Amino acid sequence: MKNIKLHIAAAILAMSMVPASAMAATTTGTLNVSAVFTSPTASINVAGPLSFGSALIDGAAGTVTASTTFDVVTANNVPYTVKVGLGLNSGLGKSRHVVNGVGDNILYDLTQASGAVWDGVVAINATGTGLAQTYTVNGSMAKPTLANLAGSYTDTVTITVTY
């Protein structure tokens, strides 16, 4: 009996020396990891054309004006700049012209709500909010005084947002 107790004690002692990891079972699982990164985007929504309408050439000097707005939408905290170009019919320097089909042209100006000129060079710096940010374009031009300048005049101006 003493011998059996000695063998049992030796077996217990031997088992206690074996690390628990050698006696434990192991199983594994997987963890899927993914990430999606997108580039910021911007959009420009113009409310409508800048239309000076129709004015009577009556020999009297005067100014015709018009106004419109455009919205810029960029992601929240994305810095951007806005420029309003000089137009397809720009002259020397920073002048804009509307032209008719026979080559006549009339000088016009575009300004911001603050009165600062949209000169095609200086940009407005802003930071996106994720919502539409509205900018104003005010236009003014001298009314022609000569009857031979009657006609329909146009120009196309590009709005550029850099982000």
Image: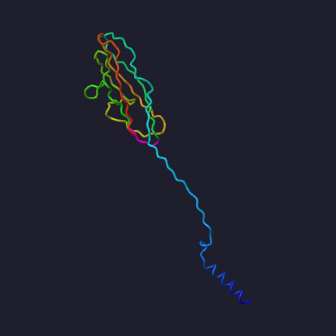
Read off the magenta span.
76-80
| Residue at image coords 58%, 61% | 28
19 on left or right of 146: right
Q: Position of residue 30 (x, y in %)?
A: 56, 57
Relative to 36, 101 lies left or right: left
Above or below: residue 93 compared with residue 75: above
Report if residue 20 lies within the magenta region. Answer: no
Quarter of the image for residue 133 reads top left
Dominant secondary structure, magenta = loop
The residue nearer to you, when weighing 123 against 18, is 18
Q: Nearer the viewer, residue 86 or 23?
A: 23
Location of residue 113 in the rendering, given as x and y in whole percent from the top left corner? 40, 29
Q: Residue furthest bottom?
A: 2
Residue in front for this viewpoint, 5 or 131: 5
Which residue lies most toward the left here?
92
Question: Residue 84 is drawn in which quadrant?
Answer: top left
Image quarter (top left, top right, bottom left or bottom right) of the N terminus? bottom right
Which percent across, then down, holds residue 163?
39, 40
Count of numbered tags: 0
Check the image and report above or below for 44 versus 28.
above
Asked where in the image residue 51 lies, by quadrant, the reply is: top left
Coloration of the structure image? rainbow
Q: Is residue 130 left or right of residue 146?
A: right
Find the residue positioned furthest to the right. Answer: 1
Where is residue 103 shown, x and y percent of the image? 28, 17
73 up-or-down from 153: above or below = below
Q: Is residue 78 magenta?
A: yes
